Image (cartoon, rainbow, N blue to C red):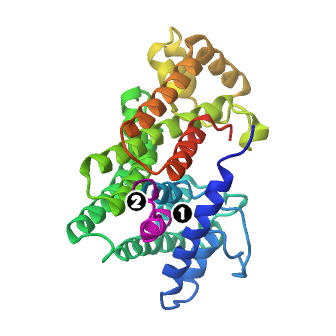
Amino acid sequence: MVDTVTPILEEYSAYTDRQMRAVLNNRKRVGRLYDMMMYHLGWLDEDFRECRAPRGKSLRSTMCLLACEAISGDSNKALPAAAAVELLHNFSLIHDDIEDGDVKRRHRDTLWKLWGVPQAINTGDAMDIAANLSLLDLDGTVEPGMMVDIIRIFNQTVIELCEGQYLDMDFQGRSDVSVGEYITMVSGKTAALIEASTAIGAMVATGDRDVISRFGTFGRKIGIAFQIRDDILGIWGDPESTGKSAKNDIRNKKKSLPVLYAMEKSRHRAELKTIYAKEQLTDGDIARVFEILTEAGALEYTQSEAQRYKDEAMAQFDGLKLHKGPMDKLRTIGRFLVERDY
């Protein structure tokens, strides 16, 4: 399959990176605080030397720029927003690593592993504020009333991220999580920032509330589909593509959509809940869970839900007069999020 997404992400992430570097470099040096941010972003190694380490795909910031360009024909005026989105996303990752106890991210030691939890928390908090400061650079580009709305949406997104993360952690100790609660959780933890990315990109480009609403709805629905695809890959993904062991989410007793569906619909749901209540799962337990999911049709259900959310997302653009080039790129990213194998 021809990779049509990577060239798009590489092109637009270069613009976002330059903007983020400007935001951080404009700050007065305070010890190694900003160097730790740059380490996390993949720009410095652990000795704070320049490097090109593995980094994220910059999906959200690219979608922000493309939303603006699809409407107005110009992505540059949304650069402060794209940098803000990317800084916010990475702030959340720093805190996620602490909360999950993850010692590796993108094949490197996590921030807290190298410099301790207190400094990692502080660095994440500072990156959150840097994101808001970047957003304020839109002042003069958009009308004051729209600027207030952008700031409101951005900070509402932070609250939704926290709410989604709370629910995700809360689910770990519960056996009665419903599919509906799962959708609420991923709407906050995963989809909210994608929605903010496309909505804010649209807000920089236009004052048309219908267009802004459609781009935001696209982001939320494609974000839910994105997380559902993650759930599929966590159980049925090819380890050579995903970089994770087979059935990894079952081993970790993750309450992903396929499992929750089976807990509601399978005739073996009581057995499934009993297995998930164990402190650790054996290989036999994992194999049995996989059998229950297969018999319940969990894969087929989950695939159909991902497709449904993707179709509903794409339908938001029907009838809008948009610039074809950036719109094609945004659609390509949307399809990638739901069809990827890694």
Between 162 and 76, the residue placed more toward the observer is 76
Q: What amino acid does circle 2 point to?
A: Ser
Residue at mark 2? 72
Q: Between marks 1 and 2, how big is the CA–CA gap?
A: 34 Å
- Magenta residues span 69-86
- What x and y, as percent, mark residue 196? 38, 54
Q: Quadrant of residue 312?
A: top left
Determine whether label 1 and label 2 are within 8 Å by CB. Answer: no
Screen quadrant of the N terminus = top right
Amino acid type at mark 1: Ile
Q: Is residue 92 above or below residue 15?
A: above
Q: Which residue is mark 1?
A: 94
Of all residues, the one furthest to the right in this rendering is 240
Residue 77 in the magenta stretch? The answer is yes
Looking at marks 1 and 2 on the same chain, the residue that comes earlier in the sequence is marked by: 2
In this view, the residue in front, 95 or 236, is 236
Image coordinates of residue 240 in percent, x first then y, are 79, 39
Q: Is residue 334 left or right of residue 240?
A: left
- Image point (22%, 71%), residue name: 144
Per the image, label 2 sits on a secondary structure element best described as: helix
Q: Is residue 82 magenta?
A: yes
Which SS type dominates the magenta stretch?
helix
Q: Residue at x 55, y 54 (%)?
A: 59
x, y percentage for residue 81?
Answer: 42, 66
What is the crowding at mark 1: few (fewer than 14 residues within 10 Å), some, or many (at least 20)?
many
